[in-house]
């Protein structure tokens, strides 16, 4: 109830002055929210006459993200003729990061901190996404070669409807950690208050392709096995990608910590095995159902 009230607040969301911005970064996981956000941002930037300042960045998560994601993010960016950048964590993918962190904690005598990320320990996001995007912003700001600090708008497709934590986020906020004497980074969530239907309508309007994982029953993209996902989504993911599920299971056994509090990868894999594997399908059903609802 609280979530719905916040979602449909009568106050219009604040809109930053795009014309006063030197660089607009569109973070794209290639998922539906990124896709809708990009379409919305392109329209606004075009109206403000600053479409040439928009850059799309995709954080390549390697094997843990859905197959074809990087290519899809690029196709969505190229649809608008926008420059496309791929970044990744140089020290290794998410499973490597989890194993390395756990080893470091153990070496320091810490045997209690959970190995896997969680809603209260989102080190996966900072390591795999936020950090590499900041490195790209540094490069792009250097290229601008301004005699003053660059004004950077870092745009993300987060939505209040996804979680209570996201519902509490402001539409616009200064990124103090990412700002420096050479740049001021403002984080903007242009579709924070959008509903699912608005997202799918924007995708229909854009005419850009969306990932087949949605037609196959997934509600979110990014990591195939997200620590924040619900049980049904995780079981569906394990049916769609049984080999990757086995890698997560092997790591869970090695670390001796369950994938989620109260839900292990062993349980997810066992339930997925009982139901049997699923093929990825692209039949447009997710879009049709969302718009018919
Ligand atoms: S998708 Fe989930 S597991 Fe992956 S980086 Fe984001 S929060 Fe972490």
Image (cartoon, helix red, strand yellow):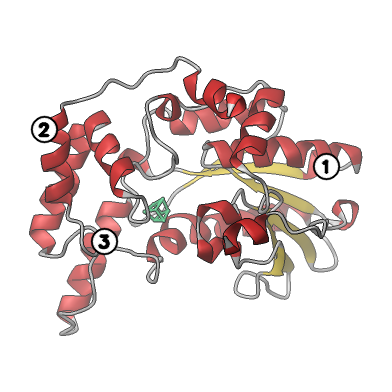
Q: Position of residue 146 (x, y in %)?
A: 83, 60
Judge whether residue 79 can be spotted in this image: no
Q: Cβ of disc 1 within 8 Å of ligand 1?
A: no
Q: Quadrant of the N terminus?
A: bottom right
The residue lying at 15 percent from left, 65 percent from top is: 257
Q: Earlier in the sequence, mark 2 or mark 1?
A: 1
Q: Secondary structure beneath disc 1? A: helix
Q: Residues within 10 Å of mark 3 (few under 14, many from 20)?
A: some
Asked if residue 57 is positioned above or below residue 10 in the image, the reply reads: above
Q: Nearer the viewer, mark 2 or mark 1?
A: 2
Q: Which residue is mark 1?
A: 45
Is residue 205 at least partly visible in the picture? Answer: yes
The Cα atoms of the two marked residues, 2 and 3, are separated by 28 Å
Q: Is residue 61 above or below residue 227?
A: above
Determine which residue is flagged by label 2. 274
* Residue at the front extreme, as displayed: 1
The quadrant of the picture occupied by the C terminus is: top right
Sequence-first tag of 1 and 3: 1
Kindly give the residue lying farthest to the bottom in the view shown: 109
Describe the element under mark 3 as helix, strand or loop: helix
Residue 160, given in percent of the width and then of the height, sits at 59, 56
Q: Which of label 2 and label 3 is nearer to you?
A: 2
Classify mark 1: residues with Cα within 10 Å, few (<14), some (14-19) or many (20+).
Answer: some
* Residue 98: image tag: 3
Residue 279 image offset from top left, x and y in percent: 28, 20
Q: Report the residue at 47% width, 33% height from top.
A: 70
**Relative image position of residue 283 (x, y in whole percent):** 45, 14
Measured along the vertical axis of the image, is residue 287 above or below residue 180?
Answer: above
Query: Please, what secondary structure does the residue beneath circle 2 have?
Result: helix
């Amino acid at each position: 109830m609280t979530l719905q009230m916040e979602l449909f607040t009568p106050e219009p969301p604040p809109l930053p002055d795009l014309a006063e911005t030197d660089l607009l970064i569109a973070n794209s996981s290639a998922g539906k929210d990124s896709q809708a956000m990009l379409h919305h941002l392109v329209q606004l930037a075009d109206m403000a006459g600053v479409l040439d300042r928009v850059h799309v960045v995709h954080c390549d998560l390697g094997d843990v993200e859905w197959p074809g994601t990087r290519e899809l993010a690029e196709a969505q960016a190229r649809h608008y003729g926008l420059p496309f950048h791929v970044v990744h964590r140089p020290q290794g993918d998410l499973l490597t990061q989890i194993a390395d962190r756990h080893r470091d904690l153990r070496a320091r005598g810490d045997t209690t901190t959970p190995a896997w990320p969680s809603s209260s320990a989102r080190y996966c996001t900072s390591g795999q996404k936020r950090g590499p995007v900041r490195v790209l912003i540094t490069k792009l700001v250097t290229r601008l070669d301004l005699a003053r600090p660059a004004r950077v708008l870092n745009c993300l497709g987060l939505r209040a409807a996804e979680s209570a934590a996201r519902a509490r986020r402001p539409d616009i906020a200064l990124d103090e950690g990412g700002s420096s004497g050479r740049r001021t980074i403002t984080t903007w969530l242009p579709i924070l208050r959008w509903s699912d239907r608005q997202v799918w309508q924007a995708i229909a309007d854009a005419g850009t392709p969306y990932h087949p994982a949605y037609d196959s029953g997934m509600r979110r993209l990014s990591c195939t096995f997200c620590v924040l996902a619900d049980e049904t989504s995780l079981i569906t993911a394990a049916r769609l990608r049984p080999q990757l599920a086995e890698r997560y299971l092997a790591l869970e056994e090695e670390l001796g910590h369950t994938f989620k509090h109260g839900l292990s990868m062993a349980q997810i894999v066992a339930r997925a095995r009982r139901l049997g594997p699923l093929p990825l399908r692209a039949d447009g059903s997710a879009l049709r159902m969302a718009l018919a609802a």
